[in-house]
Image (cartoon, coloured by chain):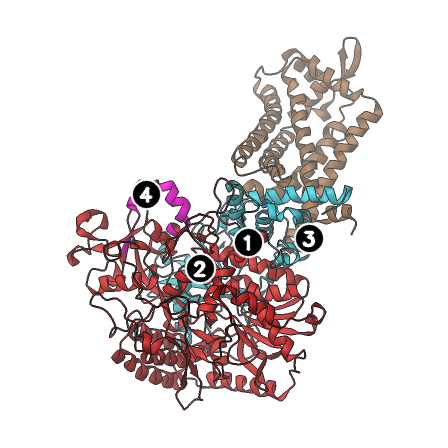
Amino acid sequence: MNPFRQLLQSSLGKKYLMALTGVVLAGFVLGHMAGNVQIFLPPEYINTYGHKLQSLPGVALWGIRGFLLLCLAVHVWLAFVLTIENRLARPLRYEAEDTVEATISSRAMPYTGLILLFFIIFHILHYTVRSVYDYSNLPYDLHGEVVHDIYAMMYLGFTHWWVSIFYIIAMSLLCMHLAHGVSSMFQTMGVRNDKWRPFLNKAALAYGWIVYLGFISIPIAVLLTEYGGLPILDKEHIEATQTLAKTLTLIHP
Amino acid sequence: MNLDAKIPEGPLAEKWDNHKFRIKLVNPANRRKYRVIVVGSGLAGGSAAATLGELGYNVECFCYQDSPRRAHSIAAQGGINASKNYQNDGDSAYRLFYDTIKGGDYRSREANVYRLAQLSGNIIDQCVAQGVPFAREYGGLLANRSFGGAQVSRTFYARGQTGQQLLLGAYSALSRQIGLGQVKMHNRHEMLDLVLVDGHAKGIVTRNLVNGRIESWSADAVILATGGYSNVFFLSTNAAGCNVTAAFRAYKQGAGFANPCYTQIHPTCIPQAGDHQSKLTLMSESLRNDGRVWVPKKAEDCGKDPRKIAENERDYYLERKYPSFGNLAPRDISSRSAKEACDDGRGVGPGGRGVYLDFTDAISRLGRSTIEERYGNLFEMYERITGENAYERPMRIYPALHYTMGGLWVDYNLQSTIPGCFVLGEANYSDHGANRLGASALMQGLADGYFIIPYTIANYLAEAGAGAPSTEAREFKETESRVEEKLGLLLGINGKRSARSFHMELGKIVWEHCGMGRNAAGLQKALELIPDLKEEFWSNLKVTGKDEELNIELERAGRVADFLEFGELLVRDALDRDESCGGHFREEHQTEEGEAIRNDEKFTNVSVWEYQGEKAPPVKHKEELKFENVSLSVRSYK
Amino acid sequence: MKLKLKIWRQKSVEMEGSLVDYQLADVSPDSSFLEMLDLLNEQMISEGEEPVAFDHDCREGICGTCSLTINGIPHGPQKATTTCQLHMRHFRDGETIVIEPFRARPFPVISDLIVDRAAFDGIVQIGGFITARTGSAPDGNAIPISKGVADKSMDAAACIGCGACVAACKNASAMLFVGAKVAHLNLLPQGAAEKDRRVLSMVSQMDRAGFGNCTNFGECSAVCPKEIPLDVIAKMNRDYATASLKNIFSQVG
């Protein structure tokens, strides 16, 4: 057989791709989170950051997006294939089943993964395509240039409590997914051993929590600001946004 | 019965080389015309099948287990001897030969033993090349330990799992040949008879243990490597499935059975805890390197916590009786001394059948981590079975049946009295005489399989010419129907008792009357009890299920039926050998200190039994043993 | 001790099986699990019933013949212990014990609790060896092997081939077994010549046999009676990746 095909069709080859795409996706979520927590800085920061990304040359922007989507697609497709194969490998399940070592996060990978997939679709529709709510009319004056007001969009998005709850749940699943996945990548790529495993497991858990806390801090801050009146976010800008949003009831509850 | 041992001419050290040169070879291109059956896939069978496959013969290999990797060689713990002299302590092939002859109490064949010693080094080389992870020193060279019955350090080991690692080495070589199609492996097949055509072994009849099918297999020669018969004692260190059936059926077909009374009791086993017990577990004798054996001096101390018994209240009886060998005295001597201490009322543990093996001194001298490194897995095993921690309180040990030196008689070529039927490993009588030294069984199995049979079988094959008969031949059909008839008989008794209960009862009789100490009255008693039990077996046995399916009870019943007949042969031989030698201790023949007294005038020979049919007792033949290089002396380990 | 047993009974590979209830009294806490089953079988034979078929041989934990999934855990609850070495003192008086065969597609049930593990032999036959024809070996001390390497190799070589790793894995993956064999031989200098060829062929045979994929649960190592470390899997992953790259870009030795 063609050696390349042999590699791709082998169980290990599939796992390598799973791990490598996992590295990309895990790296992406960390970066994404780091970008998003700029919401705790004055609105200028995140809007500058967003604008810079948006104004990348088309090839680069779509290249990055395409690459990420490709990684996602491969990751999901392989998860699907591997899970089916794994089910087939034990046609008759145990009547009494018990577990000694495997963590919940490791056993739940297919489920957390599946829910995250739905989340990602929703998330893209929500904030990137913006077809769930119409956020097209949120201008921001960035040193004289009118740009999209990401700060306001994020704020408005999370004022819908069900959206926030969904995000928080999805992020806790992501945390679980990363807690197993990040350490597992090292094992799959053959760069983990018993000396390093406890450390890598902890590091993976920490990674998951950092991403988790970073992401959920935003909807929580929005909810506390919107409903609890706590002064966490930029008060002036929030008030302006709320005023603007009043005219657009569809996007603000 | 022709008992010509075919020992080659010439000085001891040159016999094997001369022989190899003189015997016939099979041309490489012609080897594929021959088919060889190997029964058993342990160290001897596995290595033979692999090597014959490598040479280009077509091999059919059979085992009753579900994989060749499971043969009971796997359970050997301590190590394998080789006269490499890597320790620079004066070892040589001659010394290993001498130790083995002496250890066997001068009841083995000089030429065979010397060849074994000569080949021992090649085995280590071969196993290292196969990837056996022997213990190493920090410099990267092979490590050695010393073992019972020797004053040099010549034992190679892989933790406490040497047998496992050597077997996996042979299994990997065998697997390679199976993968190449040179060896066809038949797992879960039990050999139930040997097929003779014109007086030559030309095939076997097996039962497929999964579907019960009776099948014939023909070949140009048959190799039996089916292990020993310790399980005649029911409780032994052998695997539950080990049996004498293949060897015994060959005996019934005319193969002489040599020295069945030579059985070895291993001194360091975990004592029996109760009647539920199905086997005894051995712990490597290497433990005696660092452990000290003792019992309380006074019988009333036996119930006490051993740690509270003062040093001067302890009897380190091996060190006391055998100052130069001490705790490393040979197996038979250590075992008997333990029995004596227990008979004296100073045994410890359940039923007073146990002695202490104490590591306190070794732990304080070497540190716990060194002891853990050396014997960690044995200590764990001990704890799993007994629930006691041997780092903190002394182990309890007691002797148990472990190995059988007797077996089918073979000549220098490892051929039995049936032409074309070769016998290897523990199944043959050859190198260990009346007592086997520690770490020698693995050596013998592998020497037979890797380095002897590939040469000697060629001589037979070249003379006999290629051409395995058809399994449609009359001889095969007759044997098949005899096998089927016997299975039908077993299934048809429909009595009340299970085969296991008969086995257990047989074991008790043989252990009681033909165990560590034997005497004429007891042996005669056993000769009355066993036939009675046999009779009850054939009238009151219950075998559930059918023939044409997986039937564990039918398997067991067939094996027990053979053990019942074989047990009688064993006792008969023990009664006939009116002397004490090695593992065979006749209480009538001992010094005042309880040492064995041999009768060299009358018994410097091999007793070979010939089957005479159901009704008549077997006839004994003798092969005289000639000692041209060593002089017979009283074995002394003082 | 009194026990309630629920034991999988299945006449043959073609027939369907089910759990059957049995009662057993007078079990000694000092007896092993298999001796407990011996007792049950004796009781059944005396009642004219067909005894329960189970695999066993050495009964000292080294041959790897015994199996059984006990209350959902292969080889039962005690760590680093085969079923034959598991003693009844680890169970409670009156306890209900569910006994099932090892379950995996490549391990078909032959009868009751006996499964066919020939798939393991198949993997070894294709590459689980060092090609060293009898008689061709150099002196045992010709190649020094550092103690650490020899020890590591021995750790992997301790595998008894019982199949508990497959039985415990939620995906019925054989990675620990194959990894152990690969690590044992690939770590040693004697095994270096065939290193790449070995791992490529063994992995593809493992896949063909229908075992599931590794998802790094660690359950295999946790139930392994010989405590084979997960390192062996990482080692195999690494060796397979290297061998595949060599296979694609140059040549495997």
Q: Is residue A85 visible?
A: yes
**Rendered shade, chain B:** red
Q: Is residue A138 magenta?
A: no
Q: x and y percent of residue B507 in the render?
A: 35, 73
Q: Which range of residues does the magenta coloring cover?
A: B356-379
- Amino acid at pointer 1: Asp
| Rendering quarter of residue A210 | top right
Q: Chain of mark 3?
A: C
**Rendered shade, chain C:** cyan
- Amino acid at pointer 2: Tyr
Choose the circle earlier in sequence order: 2 or 1: 2
Q: x and y percent of residue A3 in the render?
A: 77, 47
The residue singled out by tag 4 in the image is: B363
Left or right: C5 in relation to A118? left
Q: CA distance from mark 2 to mark 3?
A: 45 Å
The answer to whether tags 3 and 4 share a subunit is no
Is the residue marked by circle 4 packed among few (<14), some (14-19), or many (20+) residues within 10 Å? Answer: some
Is the residue marked by circle 3 packed among few (<14), some (14-19), or many (20+) residues within 10 Å? Answer: some
The residue singled out by tag 2 in the image is: B94
Q: Measured along the vertical axis of the image, is residue A197 above or below residue B513?
A: above
Which mark is on residue B125? 1
* Residue at the image point whose x is 44% and y is 68% from the top: B110
